Amino acid sequence: MTKDGRAPEASAVLTGLLDDLRAESEGLDDLVAGLAPGEWAADTPAAGWTIAHQIAHLAWTDDWTALSARDPEAFVTESGRVFGELLAAGADPVDEGAARGAAEEPPVLLARWRAGRERLWAALAATPADLRLPWFGPPMKAPSMATARLMETWAHGQDVADTLGAVREPTARLRHIAHLGVRTMGFAFTLHGRPTPLPPVRVELTAPDGGSWTWGPADATDRVSGPALDFCLLVTQRRHRDDLALTATGPTATAWLPIAQAFAGAPGKGRPAGSDL
């Protein structure tokens, strides 16, 4: 291992993703590190979740991801046991994990999240890039795991920023989230009991630096366009479709945007229209 915990054999793609994940995590850390204890209890736009819940959820998910990378068999066994017990008791595992962490004193929670991030980065960096790791949804390779962690860190960081009235400058890291949002189009339709659409969709987004990010064939008749930030807010369900400057053309694109979802799990509830903070 190198001095920063990165395996020498880590691919350039994975290394770049982990660097971006580190930067995204540190940006959120900067938002919460100076909060007074009472501020951690502030309600966020996610119903029932405080700032402490948001950070606790990230710490919880980072720990599960690190376990999957370090010991896939232990992940399968332990996640099956823990989730089975909680579901049998009528508890939601995600909410339960966030609630337990939120009950900790803020300095303890913050320290645990920081330590867990380091373990996560080291575990993913030491994972062969082509190895599929078990997860709560379909197995994922280490680069996809890192992308998912970046997406969640950014999304929950948005909830924290909205609560604090902070404005985060969009960065080129949004490309990872947008890419995940595009790739999960079929998943979003499946979640809502709809057949996976066959017509391709062309996605053209304006990057934070004014450049252009594109996916899909240039001659596709179904198209989505607009600011990359707005697209990322949409696919992480941090803003309602009606509050974003996104344009959809064609039946598939038009049907996709209201249900777009880049994260695993059941269909998200999203945010009501007019909740743009």
Image (cartoon, rainbow, N blue to C red):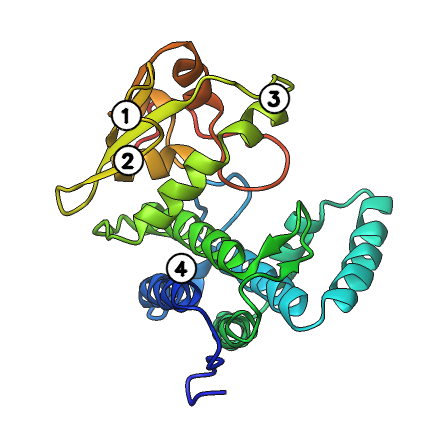
Residue that carries the numbered disc 2 in the rendered image? 214
Q: CA distance from mark 4 to mark 1?
A: 48 Å
Q: Is residue 62 visible?
A: yes
Q: Which mark is residue 39?
A: 4
Q: Is residue 102 visible?
A: no
- What's the residue type where badge 3 is placed? His
- Would you say 194 lies left or right of 166 here? right
User: In front here: 235 or 29?
Assistant: 235
Q: Is mark 4 in CB contact (under 8 Å) with mark 2?
A: no
Dot placed on the residue nearer the N-terminal end, 3 or 4? 4
- What's the residue type where badge 1 is placed? Ala
Dot placed on the residue nearer the N-terminal end, 1 or 3? 3
The secondary structure type at the circle numbered 2 is: strand
- Would you say 249 lies left or right of 39 here? left
Q: Is residue 273 above or below residue 114?
A: above
Q: Is mark 1 in CB contact (under 8 Å) with mark 2?
A: yes
Q: Which mark is residue 30?
A: none
Dot placed on the residue nearer the N-terminal end, 4 or 1? 4
- On the image, which quarter does residue 206 sit in? top left
Residue at image point 61% right, 62% down: 65
Q: Can you give x and y, in whole percent of width and height, for residue 27 in the image?
A: 31, 63
- What's the residue type where badge 4 is placed? Glu
Q: Is residue 123 above or below residue 259?
A: below
- What's the residue type where badge 2 is placed? Thr
Q: Which mark is residue 218?
A: 1
